[in-house]
Image (cartoon, rainbow, N blue to C red):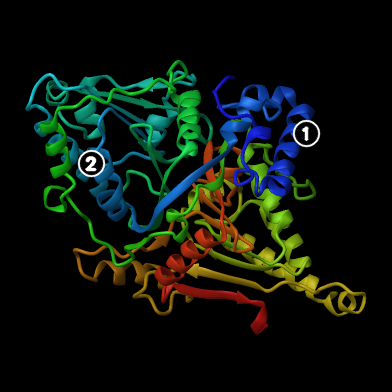
Amino acid sequence: MSHGYIPLHNRSKRDMSYSSSLVHKFLHQLQHHQQQNPIATKWELPRYDAADEADQQVLVSQSTPHVFQLGTGASIFTSLLIPAIVSARSEIVFVTCFWAPSKTLSAMTDALVKLANHRRHPPNQEPLTVRICFSSRSVFQKLLHPQSRHGYIYSPAEWQKKLGLPDPALLEEAGIRLQVKSLFFLPFSVMHPKFVIIDRQRAFIPSCNVSWEPWLEGCVEITGDAVTSLMSFYALTWEKHLDFRKPLPTSHSSRTSELQHELLDPRHLIFVPSSAHHLVRPAAASSAPLPTLVLPSSHHQNPQFRFLPWQQAAKPPATPLNVAMLELFEQARRSIYLQTPNLTCEPVIAALLDALKRGVHVTIVTGRNMMLLEQLVTAGTTTSWCLRSLVRRFKKLCTHAAHDLESGDPGLGHLRISYFHPRSATKAGKRGSQARAVNDAQMQDPEEEEPVHSHLKLTIVDGEYTVLGSGNMDRASWYTSQELGVLFHDAAFAESVREGVDLVLDQRLSLVFDSGNN
């Protein structure tokens, strides 16, 4: 593939500041796995050749993060994503996993209607292309979904009734060219990434879907070369023949720009407030672009289940995201912070135990009883069971700690595990309290959403490497779903994100295990 990127060896020292360790090992591991399993990687969607210099430039990039927004999905959409969408001049690429009737969908439709009404006057303006892509709408839709990489394209006649979108006639009159497509592969291969690209200049990577759940979510806005990498990822998955390098039209009447600018006023758009709403402006946003890895993970239809108790867990597919995460865990020297909706992936648990053996401190924030049926179907286990196993294996390591200290080993790292709960639930650790927590959250200010679960996907290693995106630390994300992660290498950015998350998590955590108190 030819993407017109600067060859890796010609990049500046700033671009390569982290490549001598993490990036070179990452690319080496990726190349090794692809050489060992050429048939397995041939059918990946999308497929990246780690030995190809052009493909390397898609993965190894740079970006400038501008904001990191925390809140519920509806609050993030209505405060950050939808205002960005209505500011688009030529093109909107909107990719999500789940699409359902919700406050978010109502706010999106309302914004598109208002944008269309403003665009109808004056006439003869440049068209606005809107591409909406998703994977899951219902169980029935997934069971009957075409098993083709071409997916299913929704006709304009289906937009209102099935998807809750505006009248096609209104959009056409306003010069809004809408395309809607879905992809799904049985049995479990959802397209799980979530990202929004505006005019091929700005990109947003949220953790939230178009859905009704009031969960804690996060979203980062970036500009820079990584946006082109995301456009490449979009084209390879959703629109193979799209020439994403072609410049977009820039000529617009002043009246159109003025009307679109007015839509950014909150009085013209729906806003859903949240008690967890918090905006972080990273310290790195005013500095040079950050070294960034764009880390796709192809879907895989074979879940590689091991049903017999004496069978070892299958190795996860060697996708860019999986390889980079395992390399990060292996290189960790001081600390690993992990926030994930679920933790059911055995290779991740094994990597955390190895890090603890090296003296690395591990902090885990996850959910209690979140999407239990999905966990059982896709992993054959639950987060609670896996955490009990992790603690049991850690305690077994502790029995050898004294001997290891005498032999010069640095000793075990500190392990701390917490469950997320709504701020109003003060006793979320007791049986039955999760239901009470949800009820308490619903009894708060009805205008303000309180998150009842954490759906944020965040990894911070050694206070320097930050990974955000769609990938969970569960078996589905590591073995079957298509995913997308973005890794930023910058200590100031990591510190800003962690401080914002800690602020939002205040009074929303129940301690499960702390090796410092055991």
User: Dividing the image into 4 quarters, which one contains the C terminus?
Assistant: bottom right
463 vs 358, nearest the viewer: 463
Q: What secondary structure is found at the residue carrying circle 1?
A: helix
Mark 2 is surrounded, within 10 Å at the Cα level, by few (under 14), some (14 to 19) or many (20 or more) other residues, namely many
Residue, far right: 407
Question: Where on the picture, by quarter, is residue 491?
Answer: bottom right
Horizontal arrangement in the rendering, residue 194 relative to residue 490 (left or right): left
**Residue 53 in the image: x percent, y percent?**
66, 27
Horizontal arrangement in the rendering, residue 505 relative to residue 385 (left or right): left
Q: Residue at (33%, 32%) from the top-left corner? A: 199
Look at mark 2 in the image and give the residue it sits on: 108
26 vs 393, nearest the viewer: 26
Residue 311, above or below 159: below
Q: Residue at (12%, 29%) from the top-left corner? A: 119
Q: Residue 23 carries which label?
A: none
40 vs 374, nearest the viewer: 40
Mark 1 is surrounded, within 10 Å at the Cα level, by few (under 14), some (14 to 19) or many (20 or more) other residues, namely some
**Residue 191 in the image: x percent, y percent?**
47, 34
Q: What secondary structure is found at the residue carrying circle 2?
A: helix
**Residue 456 in the image: x percent, y percent?**
46, 56
Q: Residue at (46%, 57%) from the top-left corner? A: 370
User: Dividing the image into 4 quarters, which one contains the N terminus?
Assistant: top right
Residue 298 appears in view: no
395 vs 69, nearest the viewer: 69
Residue 514, above or below 34: below
Look at mark 1 in the image and give the residue it sits on: 32
Q: Residue at (32%, 43%) from the top-left corner? A: 210
